[in-house]
Image (cartoon, grey):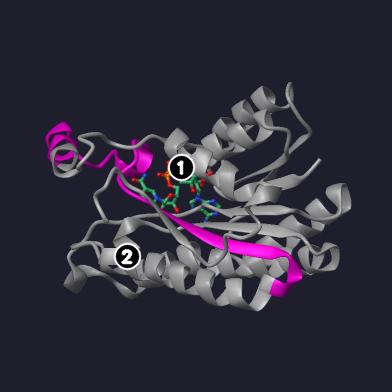
């Protein structure tokens, strides 16, 4: 039974990825940071289906990621699937972005994925199998106004994905990236209904995406049969970016 770690699985896209992987026969590690109650509820739901573990770790901290992987190694030996999903967003004019805003964005969205990939790889390399799925954003592909620091991290995730895919290809490890469009989660709770309707109207499908749209793509990339797909950026965005 393959083991999947989903970072930022307490809510939104991450929770749905954990749920779908569990329903499809994976053992699942739920990582969370601040939303302990939501993570516990998901843990209770998934333990009826599969082996599940929940671990609190701030992925922007190299030390906390190392501790999380020590716990995983102790319990499971390692992980087969890594879903680098945890992330934060912020809407601000570029000239208002502070050093703290910038550093927090980089350390969570980009360094967090780096720490998790580095910790996951030795086990994957030893067993000659691994699936790394990074959650970027369409703003990482085309740039989002008033989200320059966010867009920079998500473009960085695309670069990390492509370069790491090349380095690990002969080790049986694929590294891919999903670039979601606008998805209905707490991350977009700052937008008014009017804003969300405007985004819907700009999207060719006329819809906002759901966490399930992303989770089913994660499930596909995670499977053993997806071995010939690596270094790719899969847009799941209703046609917003083509
Ligand atoms: P969300 O509902 O706000 O959930 C974010 C998740 O990330 C939470 O589970 C949160 O955990 C976790 N997280 C944040 N900082 C963390 C940290 N330092 N350590 C560990 N976990 C941390 O957002 P979402 O929409 O599901 O977003 C998930 C991913 O999709 C993000 O990478 C986001 O950039 C990307 N994405 C989202 C959209 C969208 O429209 N929603 C579009 C494109 C890309 P705690 O609450 O437990 O701290």
Pinpoint residue 98: horizontal percent, then vertical percent. 29, 72
Q: Which residue is mark 2?
A: 141
Q: Residues within 10 Å of mark 1 (few under 14, many from 20)?
A: many
Q: Name the residue rendered at 73%, 24% in the picture.
A: 49
In this view of the protein, which residue sits in the foreground, 87 or 161?
161
- Which quadrant of the figure has residue 20? top right
Residue at the disc numbered 1: 214
| Mark 1 CB within 8 Å of ligand 1 | yes
Mark 2 neighbour density, 10 Å: few (under 14) some (14–19) many (20 or more): some
Residue at horizontal 67 percent and vertical 73 percent from the top? 168
Which element is circle 1 on? helix
Q: Secondary structure at mark 2?
A: helix
Q: Nearer the viewer, residue 64 or 201?
A: 201
**Measured from the top left, where is residue 10 in percent x and y?**
55, 38
How many discs mark residues in the rendered view?
2
Q: Earlier in the sequence, mark 2 or mark 1?
A: 2
Q: Is residue 172 magenta?
A: yes
Magenta stretch: includes residue 1: no
Of residues 232 and 73, which is closer to you in this image? 232
- Do callouts 2 and 1 mark residues in contact (Cβ within 8 Å)? no
Q: Which residues are magenta?
A: 170-198
The residue at the point 64 percent across, 78 percent down is 167
Q: Is residue 20 visible?
A: yes
Left-right relation of 237 to 201: right
How far is the residue under mark 2 from the one under mark 1? 17 Å
């Amino acid at each position: 039974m393959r083991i999947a770690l989903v970072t930022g699985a307490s809510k939104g896209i991450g929770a749905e990825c954990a749920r779908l992987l569990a329903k499809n026969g994976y053992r699942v590690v739920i990582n969370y940071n601040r939303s302990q109650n939501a993570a516990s509820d998901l843990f209770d739901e998934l333990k009826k289906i599969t082996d599940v573990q929940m671990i609190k770790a701030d992925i922007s901290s190299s030390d906390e990621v190392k501790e999380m992987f020590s716990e995983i190694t102790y319990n499971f030996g390692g992980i087969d699937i890594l879903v680098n999903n945890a992330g934060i967003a912020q809407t601000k004019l570029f000239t208002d972005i502070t050093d703290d805003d910038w550093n927090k964005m980089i350390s969570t969205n980009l360094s967090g994925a780096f720490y998790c990939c580095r910790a996951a790889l030795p086990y994957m390399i030893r067993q000659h199998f691994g699936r790394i799925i990074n959650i970027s954003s369409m703003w990482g592909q085309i740039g989002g106004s008033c989200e320059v620091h966010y867009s920079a991290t998500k473009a960085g995730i695309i670069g990390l994905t492509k370069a790491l895919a090349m380095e690990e290809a002969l080790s049986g490890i694929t590294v891919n990236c999903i670039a979601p469009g606008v998805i209905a989660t707490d991350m977009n709770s700052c937008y008014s209904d009017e804003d969300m309707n405007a985004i819907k109207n700009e999207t060719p499908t006329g819809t906002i995406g759901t966490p399930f749209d992303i989770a089913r793509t994660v499930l596909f990339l995670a499977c053993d049969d997806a071995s010939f797909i690596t270094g790719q950026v899969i847009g799941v965005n209703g046609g917003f970016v083509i």
